[in-house]
Image (cartoon, rainbow, N blue to C red):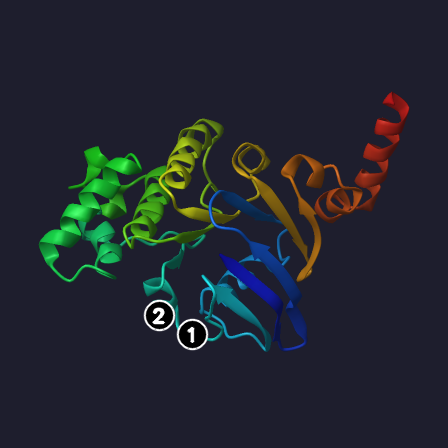
Amino acid sequence: MLEIRDLTKSFGGVQASQAVTMTMPQGGITSLIGPNGAGKTTLFALITGFHKPDSGSVRFLGEDITGMPPEAIAKRGMIRTFQTVQPFAGQSVRDNIAVGAHLKLRRRADALAKAEAVAHQVGLGDRLDMDAAALTVAGRKRLEVARALATDPKLILFDEVLAGLNPSEIRDVIPVIQAIRDSGVTILLIEHVMQAVMSLSDYTWVLNQGTLIAEGPPREVVSNPGVIEAYLGKGMAERIAKREAASA
């Protein structure tokens, strides 16, 4: 479904993405993990047209979409969310979700009907007439998911959709993401919440300093010494290795 080849991007003297190559099949959930500053959000921006790569290519459903504007990519069925959720203040939850629906639906009535259906799907059905600015952090995260889902996507890129949520809220949102996958939408997610990575992902890629350093099933990836070191530092990686050797 998604093919990235040698994707490279620099900002000044900093290489945010260094010849990143990855292939993602249709269906299921793939995660992208890595420490802060690894280049994960930059990679999302390159894939979805918010940044133009210095070199490399992005193919979606067999079509080269490299350098296309975000709206053109969204109309082809790929949409992303953002870490910072910014609802349209002064507008209802229903109207906020309808903004996403209008990408493909011209009639206002159709967009509002789509917004209502999606709101129920993500657990906002009882807050359709609430001012979106009055939502809690958890509610705003669901709203961001709903706006993306309202575009009728084939592939959604979730950028830390669980960030800022407490453990109970995370447990409540995980089934929502699983239901989206079960409806036929493919998902690529950036996530630091390892509980979610382990329970949601079929396959995981690890990015560090703009370079992919590991890939595989999540349980294998998180035990990789290089991944542990990237997240926790060399000293912690060595201590974990010693503990594992002692218990073997």
Which residue sits at x=74%, y=37%?
223
Label 1: state its secondary structure.
loop
Left or right? Give the position of 201 relative to 76.
Answer: right
Q: Quadrant of residue 11?
A: bottom right
What separation in Å lies between label 2 and label 1 (alpha carbons)? 6 Å
Compared with 166, 10 (above or below) is below
**Marks 2 and 1 in Cβ contact (< 8 Å):** yes
Provide the residue designation for mark 2: 72
**Pointer 1 local density, CA inside 10 Å: few below 14, some 14–19, many at least 20:** some
Amino acid residing under circle 2: Ala
Compared with 227, 44 (above or below) is below
Does residue 92 appear anywhere in the picture?
no
Q: Nearer the viewer, residue 2 or 143?
A: 2
Counting from the top left corner in percent of width and height, residue 106 is at: 15, 62
Compared with 134, 104 (above or below) is below
Which residue sits at x=68%, y=76%?
13
Q: Nearer the viewer, residue 37 or 74?
A: 74
Left or right? Give the position of 194 relative to 131.
Answer: right
Provide the residue designation for mark 1: 68
Which residue sits at x=36%, y=59%?
77
Q: Nearer the viewer, residue 230 or 7?
A: 7
Amino acid residing under circle 1: Met
Counting from the top left corner in percent of width and height, residue 115 is at: 20, 47
Does residue 20 appear anywhere in the picture?
yes
Compared with 94, 177 (above or below) is above
Question: In this figure, what is the number of numbered marks?
Answer: 2
Counting from the top left corner in percent of width and height, residue 182 is at: 39, 37
Counting from the top left corner in percent of width and height, residue 149 is at: 32, 49
Residue 20 is labelled as: none
Quadrant in the picture for the C terminus: top right
